[in-house]
Image (spheres, rainbow, N blue to C red):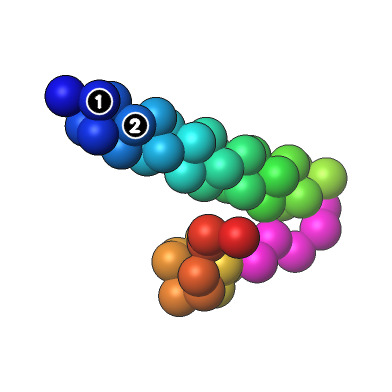
């Protein structure tokens, strides 16, 4: 059970990173800058 909870926590961290990345890219779009559409499409690796 502990392994599963740890895995869920890791997945939550990854999901929060993804949401942060998307939020930053959408913010660029809203100020008239060019967002990185390749990054948002998942073509680049998101994990750091």
Q: Which mark is residue 48?
A: none
| Residue 39 visible in the snapshot | yes
Q: Secondary structure at mark 2?
A: helix
- Residue 2 at what x, y percent from top left? 25, 25
Q: Which corner quadrant of the image does residue 39 belong to?
A: bottom right
- Residue identifier under label 2: 6
In the image, taking residue 27 as reference, residue 8 lies left or right, namely: left
- Residue 48 at what x, y percent from top left? 60, 60
- Residue identifier under label 1: 2
Residue at the farthest left position: 1
Which is nearer the eye, 21 or 14? 14
Which is nearer the eye, 25 or 11? 11
Residue located at (50% from left, 70% from top): 45
Instruction: State if disc 1 and disc 2 touch (CB < 8 Å).
Output: yes
- Residue range corresponding to the magenta coloring: 32-36
Residue 33 falls within the magenta-colored stretch: yes
Residue located at (62% from left, 48% from top): 21
Residue located at (77% from left, 50% from top): 28
In the image, taking residue 3 as reference, residue 16 lies left or right, namely: right
Task: Measure the C-alpha gap from mark 2 to mark 1.
Answer: 6 Å
């Amino acid at each position: 059970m502990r392994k599963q909870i740890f895995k869920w926590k890791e997945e939550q961290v990854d999901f929060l990173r993804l949401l942060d990345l998307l939020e930053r890219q959408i913010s660029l779009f809203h100020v008239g800058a060019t967002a990185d559409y390749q990054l948002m499409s998942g073509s680049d690796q998101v994990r750091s």
